[in-house]
């Protein structure tokens, strides 16, 4: 069966009388086609989300009609663009059938609920969902302050359970398009409605400008839309191994989400390096009167220990935010570099080799002070105002060892263990992050140095 036939007949999978032979055909196709498999999982999750206490059976033709329409609306697509700068990159989100299926169920919900057919959890979830969306419509701007256990100079996705809390600030003005800004001591990201701008202060100052969908702060984007948190979390629980619970406490409504770490952890290096890559509990508190988000607390579970990793300390709505907030004033010796120019340059990265060999060539280039090769594997290095200082510190380093590459978590590239010794006598033992998910399949370094 091909993709078209699978989608036309997917309604059969929700009929208890489907034959084992047909199930085997579907299963065989799902093993080969990730798009159809995800479409089925998401659709099944949407139905399970609002499953009634008693069985309500629609005719097969009605099921096929509903599913047929939703699948047409949610036909998967493939982006022609590669992922860029991991943990600084967009996780490409595809259109799915969930929205259409939930739309049908939400239309039926008020009628079915009168007969008590839906669980209390679904009742509370949909009630809060409707109120939150209504509350969002009146919000013109949001300002937040929150703390994350991380490093000030690391990307916004990165967390470190052993680190102290680093203060973050977020500004957002709703509009078409919306504008926002997130900053912490080591870096700032701004979306001015047309482009995204990243300024990294330390250790090597750099300023890069990219498209508005550049995923610099993907795991924090849920904070941009506090009125849509419930819907977003419901969609996530439908697609992944997660659960949510809604309770009332005095004048507050509490949404608790428990999620399992997402990714490949045969090597656990990336485990607990980001919130999605951890076993975590997210607790949101909404005001029962205004239906607006009041607080958020994220805890990570590792072994038998729970560690608070993110805490929302301040949130204010509808305060004036100056236009100058959505611009970054650079030091005189720092210039904006277009991301497309860096990554589309034919001299960026090296094709036709392994990640281990790419790592070896990088460190050999540092040893011999071949800056053209360093720039090739670390695009943008030569444009950094701190390049000369880096040359003095790392130039002439000696390679102690380069290990076997491995994959971990959700990172689309590979990690290569290494140990080098600097001229100063200091040894550095880390994992170099490299990727080649671009048209030319060229390896380049995007972290761990």
Image: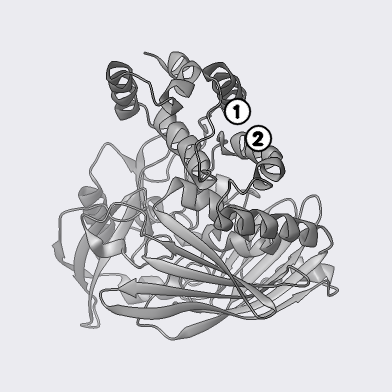
Which callout, 2 or 1, points at the residue further toward the start of the chain? 1
Residue 152 visible, this orientation: no
The total number of labels drawn is: 2
Q: Residue at x 21, y 49 (%)?
A: 357
Residue 104 shows which numbered tag? Answer: 2
Crowd around label 2: few <14 · some 14–19 · many ≥20 (10 Å):
few
User: Above or below — where is 131 with respect to 38?
Assistant: below
| Cα–Cα gap, marks 2 and 1 | 9 Å
Task: Say whether marks 2 and 1 touch (CB < 8 Å).
Answer: yes
Question: Quarter holding the C terminus?
Answer: bottom left
In the depicted view, which residue is nearer to us: 243 or 92?
A: 243
Q: Using the rendered view, name the quadrant where residue 140 is placed.
A: bottom right
Q: Secondary structure at mark 2?
A: helix
User: Above or below — where is 359 with respect to 291?
Assistant: above
Q: Secondary structure at mark 1?
A: helix
Question: Farthest residue in the bottom direction?
Answer: 164
Q: Using the rendered view, name the quadrant where residue 287 is placed.
A: bottom right
């Amino acid at each position: 069966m091909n993709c078209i036939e699978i989608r036309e007949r997917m309604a059969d999978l929700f009929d208890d009388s489907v034959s084992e032979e047909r199930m085997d055909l579907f299963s065989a196709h799902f093993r080969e086609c990730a798009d159809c498999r995800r479409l089925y999982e998401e659709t099944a999750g949407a139905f399970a989300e609002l499953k009634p206490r008693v069985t309500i059976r629609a005719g097969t033709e009605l099921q096929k009609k509903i599913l047929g329409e939703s699948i047409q609306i949610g036909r998967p697509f493939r982006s022609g663009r590669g992922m860029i700068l991991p943990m600084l990159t967009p996780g490409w989100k595809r259109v799915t059938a969930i929205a259409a299926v939930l739309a049908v169920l939400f239309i039926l919900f008020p009628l079915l609920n009168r007969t008590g057919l839906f669980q209390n959890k679904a009742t509370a979830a949909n009630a809060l969902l409707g109120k939150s969306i209504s509350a969002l419509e009146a919000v013109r701007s949001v300002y937040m302050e929150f703390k994350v256990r991380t490093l000030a100079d690391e990307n916004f996705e990165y967390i470190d359970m052993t680190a102290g809390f680093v203060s973050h600030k977020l500004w957002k003005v709703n509009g078409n398009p919306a504008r926002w800004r997130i900053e912490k001591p080591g870096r700032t990201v701004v979306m001015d409605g047309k482009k995204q701008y990243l300024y990294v202060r330390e250790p090597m100052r750099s300023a890069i400008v990219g498209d508005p969908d550049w995923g610099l702060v993907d795991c924090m984007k849920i904070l941009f839309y506090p009125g849509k948190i419930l819907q977003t979390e419901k969609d996530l629980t439908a697609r992944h191994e997660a659960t949510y619970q809604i309770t009332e406490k005095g004048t507050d409504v509490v949404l608790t989400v428990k999620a399992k770490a997402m990714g490949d952890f045969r090597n656990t290096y990336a485990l607990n390096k980001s919130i999605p890559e951890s076993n975590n509990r997210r607790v949101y508190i909404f005001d029962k009167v205004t239906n607006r988000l009041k607080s958020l607390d994220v805890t990570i579970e590792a072994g038998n220990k729970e560690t608070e990793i993110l805490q929302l300390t301040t949130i204010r709505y509808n305060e004036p935010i100056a236009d100058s907030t959505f611009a970054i004033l650079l030091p005189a010796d720092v210039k904006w570099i277009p991301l497309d120019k860096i990554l589309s340059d034919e001299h960026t990265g090296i094709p036709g080799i392994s990640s281990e060999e790419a790592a070896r060539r990088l460190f050999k280039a540092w040893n011999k002070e071949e800056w053209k090769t360093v720039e090739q594997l670390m695009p943008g290095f030569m444009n950094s105002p701190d390049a000369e200082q880096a040359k003095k510190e790392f130039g002439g380093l000696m390679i102690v060892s380069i290990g076997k590459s491995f994959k971990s978590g959700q990172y689309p590239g590979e990690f290569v263990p290494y140990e080098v010794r600097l001229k100063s006598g200091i040894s550095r033992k880390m994992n170099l992050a490299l990727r080649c998910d671009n048209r030319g399949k060229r390896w380049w370094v995007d972290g761990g140095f």
